[in-house]
Image (cartoon, rainbow, N blue to C red):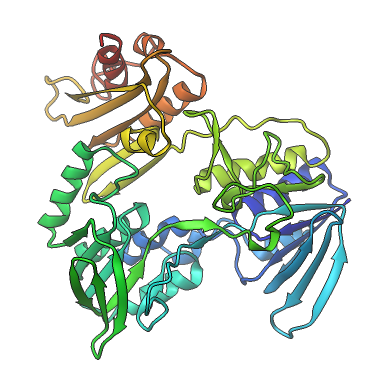
Amino acid sequence: MKVAIIGCTHAGIFSARGILETDPTAEITVFEKNDTVSFLSCGIALWVGNHVSDPEKMFYDSVEAMKNDGIDMKMQHEVTNVDLENKVVTYQNLENQQEKTEKFDKIVVTTGSKPVMPPIPGINGKNIYLCKNWDDAKAINEAVKDVKSAIVIGAGYIGAEIAEQFSVSGIKTTLIDGLDRVLAKNFDKDITDEVEIEYQKHDVTLGLGQMVQAFESTDDGVKVTTDKGSYEADIVVLGIGFLPRTDLFTGQVDMIKNGAIIVDKYMQTSVKDVYAAGDSATVFYNPTQQDDYIPLATNAVRQGILVGKNILKPTVAYLGTQATSAVELYGKAMASSGLNQQLAQARGIEGIKTVTIEQDYRPDFMLTTTPVRATLVWDENTRAVLGGSFYSEHDISQTANALSLAIQNKMTIDELALSDFLFQPNFSQPINFLGAVAMAAAKQ
């Protein structure tokens, strides 16, 4: 069995290794236009803030290791054309420009995502950086050695983290977003209000509810003009968002509106023997029971594993995702799973209810304790748990994982309220805050 894997993102790596586990005789060829694999881009902001022990450790696999395991790694090779129906791949060696065409038995599309680049005048100008891959990371880290000011475009996870690390590193920072709140798609207003106060405490200028109209190179750096004003800094970092990198396959395979390739629960596309995974593919979003586009490394890894398990025949079904995630800004931990009010509204989901509580994470007789804010989202009719979030100086990240399991297993707020959570004064109240917020919901 000859298998072509197009793109060696997280999904590509786990697909390749998984296929070998399922069929050790498979001939696997990986096509990747870059010269590295497995870069954890979520660590870029941490590297900027000097929280990374060794940037080389931001890679969890290597080209050499994959080659040693028998995978044909065609690095710095760009796929220029694909005939999915006939499984024919045309590719170019970027070092010598030689082009070849090869036929395969199966194709795996793991081309990942590309940064959103709106057609704004000057967006490709000097001193404007992307925040996506290893080359971007190196460029940003080299640039910040000499800068005193920076503008970050986009206040999602990536932009929010980069802006935070710039500000605590002594760089005068401006954070701009078209929405009227930071992390507006990730958390409800009660949490984002707290985050915005932290930015202001650290002298970050917030340009929220503003649309960028132009970038202009200046003698000292870059000028950014929005519909509400203008800002200048030494550099600009773009964190606007991502879209699936699937232009090669347009018209050949079923996609959703933004170009993400639709896959079934076995990672198969609408074309026989063609699979897709990771940021190039849809995910099944359990809170809505619909296909969606949620580019997260966790989704990519699990989908890649499933490609491997299902490459010979449908064997292991996808359990879906809750888009569980977390971030820490200025010592405040935020974690979520499933829907919040903003996400529900954007997806046209009606009939949801929410409740928020705040309690110390452990008993007050302890010498120290810390308050936790917990929010739960559920379906008013079925009482099924659909989402929630947590905010505290205490590490609440693993609670989002527990909530994720509740959503995945279609638990109701009544079942979650009576679930077994540990009590030990070092760690928890007699009623854990996840159980407590479920109890509050059950009383509504």
| Count of numbered badges drawn on the protein | 0
Nearer the observer, 412 or 162: 412
Between 333 and 303, the residue placed more toward the observer is: 303
Q: Residue at x 28, y 63 (%)?
A: 211
Residue 330 in percent (x, y) is at 21, 51
Check the image and name the residue furthest to the bottom. Answer: 219
Left or right of 325: which side holds 283? right
Asked if residue 274 is positioned above or below residue 434 in the image, the reply reads below
Residue sitting at x 34%, y 33%: 340
Report which quarter residue 208 is drawn in: bottom left
Q: Is residue 42 visible?
A: yes
Quadrant housing the C terminus:
top left
Q: Nearer the viewer, residue 117 or 43?
A: 117
Quarter of the image for residue 227 reads: bottom left
Task: Provide residue 104's location: percent of width, then percent of height.
Answer: 86, 57
**Residue 112 relative to residue 354: left or right:** right
Q: Position of residue 133 (x, y in %)?
A: 50, 66
Q: Is residue 170 visible?
A: no
User: In the figure, 379 relative to 310: above or below?
Assistant: above
Would you say 99 lies left or right of 403 here?
right
Residue 35 lies, in percent from the top left, at: 62, 72
